[in-house]
Image (cartoon, rainbow, N blue to C red):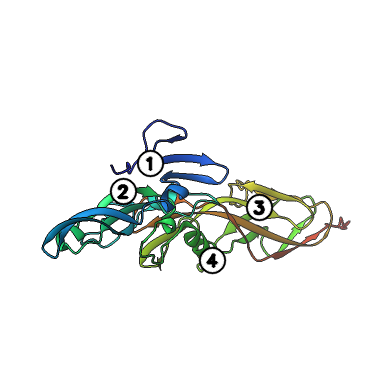
Amino acid sequence: MAAPTTPPTSGGDWCDALVCSKTDGGGKYIGLSRAATSALPPKGRATFVEAGKKVTKEVPYQYVTLLACGNNSPVGQTEIGCTAAYETCQGANVEGPYTRIYRKLLTPDAARSNVWENVGTTCFPTAVPNAVQRPRLTLAMIRSQWERTQFAKPTVSMQPIGGKTLVTLPTFFQLAYPATGFQPNEINTVNLLGHQVRIKPTFKHNVFSYGDGGSSGPTQSGGGVYPDGDIKHAYDKSGTYVTSVSTTYGGQYSVDGGEWADIPGSVTVAGPSSQIQVVTTKNQLVNN
């Protein structure tokens, strides 16, 4: 009997003779464990006609692994990807992606040799015996591509304009993204191992640095101008200070038009620095 391809609806860890849903320190997976996947039999018994006689023999299995997406099957299908296949299997000890396992008996009977059996699912596709292994897109590849994204570098502008302000006068700071690079929610589409992968930087927070040891953030704000801007700072001493802003990006991905899913981790991108000169005022007595 083939293992189920989806877990029960009840929560928590569970296992039966063929299939597991497991969450532990090494990650999460559903389907056959690594040990159960590698223990799939390399041979099976088949009855067929040989030299005019009906015989029953052990013959090799041929295994095929396909992403657990849509109608993927070993018969006349071009494999498609889906975000869920990469989201299901996660963790340091779980290779992924979530995969269906099919097998057939290799017999001289051509009709029998075209009968595929679904034997379950696994998060350990490279452990399947007697399978033709081909390069397979993984979440690690997607994350690596996201980390190489040309993220937009945030710039900071100040008011009063002109790069000069007065001691104790509130200076307003505002973030802007340049035209180059990918800003939050802009989509970068790439092709990875034949799959269309959309990668979308997402916004987590900003940190504004004022150059005198002061800062604002992490904050969801991009600042603004007088009088309503909420990112502002008053300098206590005169001098020239180097200011900057950095944005921390998260990410989402979609495979072959599938749903969006979060990419684990974050990337912090520092923008170019700007100088601001802080000066004092002098009182001067004027005779009329």
Task: Between label 2 and label 4, give the one nearer the viewer.
Answer: 2
Q: In the picture provided, is 156 more to the left or to the right than 197? A: right
Question: What residue is rendered at 35% in x and 65% in y?
Answer: 132
* Residue 204 image offset from top left, x and y in percent: 56, 49
Q: In the picture provided, is 288 more to the left or to the right than 109? A: right
Tag 3 residue: 207
**Which three-letter amino acid code belongs to the residue tagged 3?**
Val
Query: SS class of the residue under badge 1?
Result: loop
Tag 1 residue: 18
75 or 46: nearer the eye? 46
Label number found at residue 155 = none
285 or 168: nearer the eye? 168
Task: Between label 1 and label 4, give the one nearer the viewer.
Answer: 1
Query: SS class of the residue under badge 3?
Result: strand
Tag 2 residue: 119
Query: SS class of the residue under badge 4?
Result: loop
Specify which label sits upstream in the sequence, 2 or 3: 2
Please identify the quadrant where the C terminus is shown.
bottom right
**Which three-letter amino acid code belongs to the residue tagged 4?**
Arg
**Which three-letter amino acid code belongs to the residue tagged 2?**
Val
Q: CA distance from mark 2 to mark 3?
A: 52 Å
Tag 4 residue: 148
* Residue 195 image offset from top left, x and y in percent: 36, 64
Quick one: label 2, few (<14), some, or many (20+) residues within 10 Å?
some
Taking the view exactly as shown, the residue that stands out farthest to the left is: 52
